[in-house]
Image: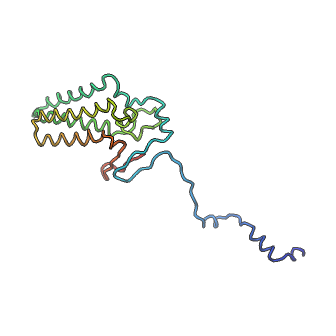
């Protein structure tokens, strides 16, 4: 009976202080806030031109664990001579083909070397060796050379070779306008521009051809 005599105000205040037990109805009405997912990998970008972001602290540690055998060979003894040997072998091969003139032989040699070096240095990403935990998966071979240090002797040599080959091809093609245009266009677009500092870590995606630019 004593409880019946309690003031209504105190009873109502006690009821307000009590919190209802969470149920499915109350929890479903409130919007759920998802915790941010921390992922060190960078997301894909749908833009045509994108830039590869710097590596995370974990990726930098993985890169420093062991020498990058995919890129250190360019500084080894005899590595530079390989380019000269490849060019000579290409020239001999096209000279042996029937019906190929000297002008076209030099042009095909230049085109083959430029396209091959572009695929090797600027198109394929990552390394064939899994020794750094995928720390180089976002970088081309050109970007891996000399730990991304610009203007090294190896980089200067790799820039000069296609330029000299272009000049030689132009000379032996007797400055034919059509052959000159082919040689200049391929050398400039595929061999010179991708090696410039302004295009370092730059990715260009052509919709329907190259797919989305992968920043990670």
Residue 215 screen position, x and y as percent: 41, 47
Residue 171 screen position, x and y as percent: 12, 34
- What residue is drawn where x is 48% and y is 35%? 62
Q: Residue 94 appears in which quarter of the rendering?
A: top left
Nearest the eye: 94 or 115: 115
Q: Residue 143 appears in which quarter of the rendering?
A: top left
Residue most extreme to the front: 151
Task: Please tell me how many numbered marks the rendered image carries.
Answer: 0
- What residue is drawn where x is 11% and y is 42%? 177
- What residue is drawn where x is 24% and y is 32%? 161
Q: Quadrant of the N terminus?
A: bottom right
Q: Residue 68 appears in which quarter of the rendering?
A: top left
- What residue is drawn where x is 76% and y is 71%? 15
* 156 with respect to 139 (left or right): left
Residue 129 screen position, x and y as percent: 42, 32
Residue most extreme to the top: 77
Q: Quadrant of the C terminus?
A: top left
**What colour-coding does the image apply?**
rainbow
Residue 103 screen position, x and y as percent: 11, 35
């Amino acid at each position: 009976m004593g409880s019946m005599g309690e003031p209504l105000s105190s009873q109502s205040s006690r009821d307000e202080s009590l919190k209802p037990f969470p149920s499915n109805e109350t929890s479903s009405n409130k919007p759920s806030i998802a915790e941010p997912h921390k992922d060190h990998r960078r997301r894909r970008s749908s833009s045509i031109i994108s830039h590869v972001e710097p590596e995370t602290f974990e990726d930098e540690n993985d890169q420093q664990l062991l020498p990058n055998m995919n890129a250190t060979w360019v500084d080894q003894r005899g590595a530079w001579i390989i380019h000269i040997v490849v060019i000579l072998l290409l020239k001999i091969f096209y000279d042996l083909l029937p019906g190929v003139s000297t002008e076209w032989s030099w042009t095909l040699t230049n085109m083959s070397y430029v396209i091959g070096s572009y695929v090797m240095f600027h198109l394929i990403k990552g390394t064939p060796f899994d020794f750094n935990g995928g720390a180089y998966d976002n970088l081309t071979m050109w970007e891996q050379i000399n730990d991304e240090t610009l203007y090294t002797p190896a980089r200067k040599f790799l820039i000069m070779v296609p330029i000299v080959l272009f000049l030689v091809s132009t000379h032996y093609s007797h400055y034919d306008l059509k052959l000159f245009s082919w040689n200049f266009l391929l050398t400039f677009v595929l061999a010179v521009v991708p090696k410039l500092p302004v295009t370092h870590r730059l990715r260009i995606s052509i919709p329907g051809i190259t797919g989305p630019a992968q920043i990670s």
